[in-house]
Amino acid sequence: MVGYDEVYTRSLADPEGFWREAVQALEWQHPPQQVLDSSRAPFTRWFPDGVLNTCHNAVDRHVHAGRGEQPALIWDSPVTGSQRVLSYVELRDEVARCAGALAGLGVVAGDRVVISMPMVPEALVAMLACARLGAIHSVVFGGFAARELAVRIDDARPKVVVSASCGFEGARLVEYKPLLDRALELASHRVDGCVMLQRPEHPVALVPGRDVDWDEALAAAEPAGCVPVRATDPLYVLYTSGTTGRPKGVVRDNGGHAVALRWSMEAIYDTGPGEVFWAASDVGWVVGHSYIVYAPLLAGCTTIVYEGKPVGTPDPGAFWRVASEHGVKTLFTAPTAFRAIKKEDPKGEHLARYDLASFAALFLAGERLDPDTYEWAADLLGVPVIDHWWQTETGWPIAANPLGIERLATKPGSPSRPMPGWDVRILDEAGAEVPAGTEGAVCMRLPLPPGALTTLWDDDERFVDSYLARYDGYYLTGDGGYVDADGYLFIMGRVDDVINVAGHRLSTGSMEEVLATHPDVAECAVIGVADPLKGHVPHGFVVCKAGAERDEQALAAELVALVREQVGPVAAFKHVHVVDRLPKTRSGKILRATMRSIADGRAYETPSTIDDPAILDEIADALRAR
Ligand code: COA
Ligand code: AMP
């Protein structure tokens, strides 16, 4: 049997041969003759002359191959007490009608469609309908505020927005319509129309001349066929947090994405046609794009769409109920979900109520998997628990334990080894590779494999500046870490101003921008502070303007409300410290990294450039008092 070492080595020695073979798992209108085009490096393109349709490969192809009656999608919504199963035939028909409705609103290949929806089957239908037309979807997570949605609308300039009347956060009803109305008011870009899904729990009044009703539009539409597109044409733009308040529009192509995701399902997740795959995430994140929607469907699996939480909907046995009821083979979620379950059901008593005969593996990603949570899950479940590391930009795992190739020995705290195609190197400040065991910047040698981002939407320059300019010939991940003597990677966390809160990626810069707008705030800094449940939570440090005699608690409450209103509830911004000064270098740069070390109780050296070392004690006092 060919093992990991051989497969990995070959993928780097002969990338074209390696990925040419993977192409064959898909149907192409024009199979690519050329595998990699490096003529415009660093803008490399995979399968430049290939022509295909991603929706055809994810949906119609399986109907033609005799899987039409197999469930493609199972929607399980404990928050509304509903379930719905769509077979591949039913999914194809609904997607074709949705594509017809979008086409009726003027959407053609290359147009953008913003999708802002809760975890309902229609969210997937809308995404696949865009893919069917060759249109480019941009899904925006529902936990962001109207302003964040407006920023994304202005950047993507969609022809149409698809949304719903409401979502549910546990028992809380989240109104989507006012959020959309406000975002469209704030945005300078004008859309041609909105398709609104009316949920029976909370129908809303539609805006005449702007909104069309989902059901009516689909009922009236002619089913649309799949439009062949170039492999290099964009499939979607997904905004992710950068280090500033302006999100980055990660662009994914059609061909490389389909090839890589299809390949990953068997090689990494060991899940194949007819098997049930469940990514308990949200379609608004990359995990949702890749492993709720595209990868399982490209592989002919059944995907679970779950509208609920790990706990509280109704209890910490929710994951086990869903896994047992629908015969889940592979579950993928964030460590924070398991920490939440562990907190409420430390002995795993809820698990004992369910038969998990089909359950074969748990994959965790989105943030560091702490060894305690790993041990707890592994002991409880008795199946492989796989930590794997990736980013919105990469679209699929950079490092993992590839169950479909070879199950590697596990080292708690490590997402194991680099996956085929990812040439991971650890570099020092000067760009030299560091020896095993030494921490540095985690980078990948170019070219990146299929499925990785091809650029940032409408901003090639920012793409190069953000990822490629720091080290010539390498992609900068923004994570720090090391590789040990056995080739195992250890990710120690972000080295920039991005934080992961409950598996959600957020920019501290965007929160700082909001705090700075408060009339009483002179200056501020936001850092991520370790939290036993959410991994990290943001803490804001603010210095008041001279003369602003404010009650600290009242000011803190105003600032918390401001971030919730401007960034969104998902920021989980609840801690504000009013301080006299912020630690800065003599040139005025705020020492956020030192503040992070203090907050996490890690050893740090007082930077020689600091203007007044005593401020560090004040920061430590403020954190201790929280
Ligand atoms: N729409 C509207 N609001 C949302 C939202 C959405 N889609 N998602 C989250 N929010 C809100 C939450 O309701 C919460 O609001 P609150 O402050 O009023 O309580 C806030 O944003 C913070 O959410 P979260 O950090 O998720 O905290 P939580 O207490 O609701 O749940 C967990 C904690 C651990 C159960 C939850 O974060 C979880 O399941 N995480 C898994 C993360 C995940 O799937 N990540 C994707 C990568 S794999
Ligand atoms: P996102 O783009 O939202 O997927 O977030 C990507 C970031 O999450 C990475 O850059 C890491 O900082 C972090 N991350 C994701 N998976 C892991 C993991 N398995 N271990 C450690 N950090 C992770």
Image (cartoon, helix red, strand yellow):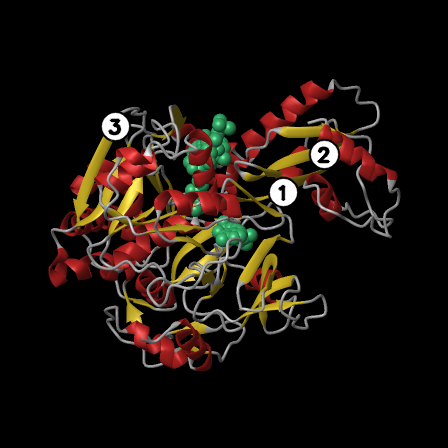
Do callouts 2 and 3 mark residues in contact (Cβ within 8 Å)? no
Nearest to the observer: residue 560 or residue 151: 560
Q: Is residue 28 above or below residue 342?
A: below
- Mark 3 belongs to which amino acid? Gly
Distance Cα–Cα, label 2 vs label 3: 42 Å
N-terminal label among 2 and 3:
3
Q: Is residue 23 above or below residue 185?
A: below
Q: Residue at x 22, y 39 (%)?
A: 325
Q: Is mark 1 within 8 Å of ligand 2?
A: no
Q: Residue at x 32, y 30 (%)?
A: 208
Q: Is residue 241 left or right of residue 25?
A: right
Instruction: Look at the numbered disc 2 and give the secondary structure of its residue.
Output: strand
**Disc 2 designates what residue?**
541
Q: Is residue 14 above or below residue 204?
A: below
Percent x, y for residue 429?
71, 66
Q: Is residue 581 left or right of residue 315?
A: right
Q: Is residue 208 left or right of residue 415?
A: left
N-terminal label among 2 and 1:
1
- Mark 2 belongs to which amino acid? Phe
Instruction: Look at the numbered disc 3 and give the secondary structure of its residue.
Output: loop
Q: Is mark 3 within 8 Å of ligand 1?
A: no
- Mark 1 belongs to which amino acid? Thr
Q: Quadrant of residue 123?
A: top left
Distance Cα–Cα, label 3 vs label 1: 37 Å
